[in-house]
Image (cartoon, helix red, strand yellow):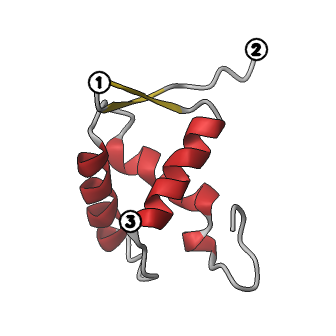
Amino acid sequence: MIVPTKGVAPQRALLAVGAQIVLATERQPVTVTQAWRRLLRWREKNNHRAPLTFWWFALALDLLYAMDLVDIDQDVLIFRARDDAA
């Protein structure tokens, strides 16, 4: 589920969806609704045809939060850059 398996296509793995969220939002502060819409447009533009439900998107956001890559402040998602040197 987090990584691709026999049952989870690479483009639907939560790590991949999380990366797609970051790419689609360009790390700009956005609401959850804006992030969802941008992700759907990004996936369509990049020919990702595997179906994606909102709850799967929410799980990917949870994973980003657990990895300390996103936070929410006053209903806005704030993306953080990870410092590999730390």
In this orientation, which residue lies closer to the viewer: 5 or 61?
61
Q: Position of residue 69 (x, y in %)?
A: 56, 32
Measured Cα–Cα span from mark 2 to mark 1: 28 Å
Q: Quadrant of the N terminus?
A: bottom right
34 w.r.t. 43: above or below = above
Q: Earlier in the sequence, mark 3 or mark 1?
A: 3
Q: Position of residue 74 (x, y in %)?
A: 29, 24
66 w.r.t. 11: above or below = above
Point out the frontmost of discs 2 and 3.
Answer: 3
The amino acid at mark 2 is Ala
Residue linked to disc 3: 54
Residue located at (29% from left, 69% from top): 45
Q: Secondary structure at mark 2?
A: loop
Residue located at (75% from left, 16% from top): 85
Residue linked to disc 2: 86
Residue linked to disc 1: 74
Point out the frontmost of discs 2 and 1.
Answer: 1
Measured Cα–Cα span from mark 3 to mark 1: 21 Å
Q: Earlier in the sequence, mark 2 or mark 1?
A: 1
